[in-house]
Structures are given as structure tokens and as C-alpha cells.
Image (cartoon, rainbow, N blue to C red):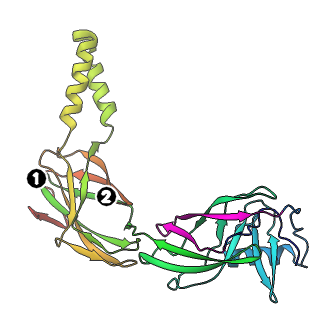
Amino acid sequence: MADPPPNAATPPSGEPFELKGPPGALVGMLEVAASPMAAADSGSFNLGLFEKAHLARAAGVAPGDMAVFDFDGVERTVATPPTGDSPFAVLLKSNLPPSRRPPRALRIGRAAPGETRMTPVRYAVDPLTPPGGYSATFSVGQAQREARIVVLPQEGLSIEPRQISLSGRPGEAVVEDLVLENTGNTPIELGALGAMVTEEDEQVCLSLQHAMARTGEKGAMGFLDAFASSLADRKTDLVRVAIASGGLRLLPGEARQVAVAFHLPENMKPGRRYHALLKCGSAQLSTQITVLGPNAPTAKVRKGET
């Protein structure tokens, strides 16, 4: 069999290498040797562009990169169109749990033709893969390499919808139904989701206009004092956000529609509208809050809920 093309990694050592990290960012080091031969012609092996692109998609190889495929028991290195210089190695077998998506190829760092060196390797598994140790076999150049895969815990949360509008009186807890999904690989416990800093609509512009109206009274210092005073007048306490029922446990991949309580601070001003951003782990929720007067009707509001 002909030597592999440049950057097709041929490991000089048969020792297993380790890939470690969260599911989407497993990294490690692998000793490889690049052949001094010229790169294989992507037009060889009687494969057309469509067949090569199909093979690349099936193996998770990006177009423009090198990959190793088995043709009737003979391993061939194929440069998927267009030819690139970042090699990949195909996963042959593993004891990883079943995935919702096709297995990806192992990405191997570049080695110069004829060079033998330690090079970084990167891999990704299904985001819901439980933390723990696994084994895998990759086809690297003309050899099979064993790998130890150590998947670390990674919490992940998504909130849908990502943008909502609320209305309520100062001091009330406004309840909104949201869909929470655990996108990580470990269970998460949810209770208090966080606190939001509010900003009134056109807060800075309104404060500047207020300050400019007083510029003539005391000059620059009067402007600064008026600007700071106006900003302070528009400041509110934090909006505290929590699961209305008190607590929730989500398993990896689990999603639930739950009631979420938004506790409006007492010093919000009726008739004003505020914007706030909730950050809870990897999730974000943009919120617009309209503050109602004492006699305005409201919906989904629970006074004094904790």
C-alpha cells in the first residue's frame, strides 16, 4: 500500500492517547508522523465530487479536509473537495452511548511533510454523553489508534421563548410559563434563577435632557449633578426570578414547561417601562416590564409570592 499523503497522521507509538474535556471540546495530544510524499490526488479512487462530499458528511468531515475511508478492506486517504491540509481520522468503534447524530471525525493538528511530533487532537461527542471514561478506536493514516475518552460534567440550560413582555404593579410577583431544557450532560437543580438589573426606556436620553435643561443654572457642575440625580431617580432594585413552585430538577436532555415568578421591586414607577436581561448559566432571557398603576387590571399575578 502506498504511503499516506502529507498530514495523514501515522502514529509511531501504539500507546493509547487521551481525549479529555466537556462533550463538545475534547482535546489531547498525539504523536504523529507525516509522510514526505505529495498529497493524494482527490480525483483518484474513481470518486466524484458528489461521492466525496457524501462520504465527508457521513463521517462528519468538513469539505476541504483529509479523511481516511475503508474501500473493500483497503484504507484510502481521500481529499474531500476542495483539497485541504487539516487531516481527520474516522471513528471505527467505541463504547460511547448511542448518539442522536452521526459520529464526528477526529481532527488532527498539522504536521509538516516528513515530520514526527506531538500534535493537538480535538474531538466532540453528543452533548448529552454522561460524564465518565470511554474507549474508542480511530483510523489514523494507515494505523488504528486506541483512545481513552474522559468526558467531564458540563451544565447547560436553555429558556424558551427567549424574549417576553410582562406587566404588573410594584411589589407583585408576575408569573410566566416558560420552557426550561437541560442541554448539559449532568442533572441540574433549579430554584432561584437569578436577579435582573432594570433599565428604563430611553433612561440615559431622558436623564441627559433633564440635565441639559439645568445647564444654565450652575454650569457644568449643575449639569453633572442633575444628570446623576436623574439617573438615581430612575434606578430600581433588582427583579428577582425564581421557580414559582420553589424548586425543579431536570435530567440531561429533559425539558419542562414551568411557572416562573418575576418579583417586581417596590420602587418601580407606575407608568414606566423597563428592560432587563436574565442570565442563568448558559441561558439568557430578554424581558420587557410595563409597570401598572394601583387600579390597573393584571393577569397571572400573585401578590407577595415567595
Query: In the figure, 304 relative to 129: above or below?
Result: above
Q: Which of 5 and 36 is in front in this view?
A: 36
**Residue drawn where x is 31% and y is 42% of the image:** 201
Question: In what quadrant of the picture does the N terminus appear?
Answer: bottom right
Number of disc labels: 2
Which element type, helix, strand or loop, lies under badge 1? Answer: loop
- Circle 2 crowding by C-alpha within 10 Å: few under 14, some 14–19, many from 20: few
Amino acid beneath label 2: Ser
- Residue 145, image x, y percentages: 65, 76
What segment is highlighted magenta in the picture?
14-35
Q: Quadrant of residue 250?
A: bottom left
Residue at screen point 36% across, 79% down: 254
For the residue labelled by badge 2, is the local secondary structure a helix, a strand or a loop?
A: strand
Depth-wise, is mark 1 or mark 2 nearer the camera? 2
Q: Give the residue type at disc 1.
A: Pro
Q: Which residue lies most toward the bottom here?
A: 72
Rendering quarter of residue 104: bottom right
Q: Does the magenta stretch include residue 27?
A: yes
Determine whether, in the image, residue 137 is placed left or right of residue 233.
Answer: right
- Residue 269's spot in the image, x, y percent? 17, 44
Disc on res. 294: 1
Q: Where is residue 108 in the image (x, y as percent from the top left)?
A: 67, 64
How far is the residue under mark 1 from the one under mark 2?
19 Å
- Does residue 149 belong to the magenta stretch? no
Q: In this view, does 175 lie to the left or right of 37?
A: left
The answer to whether residue 297 of the structure is visible from this angle is no
Asked if marks 1 and 2 touch (Cβ < 8 Å), the reply is: no
Lower sequence index among marks 1 and 2: 2
Res. 165 mark: 2
Q: In this view, does 153 lie to the left or right of 146?
A: left
Residue lying at 17% horizontally and 54% vertically, measured from the top left: 264
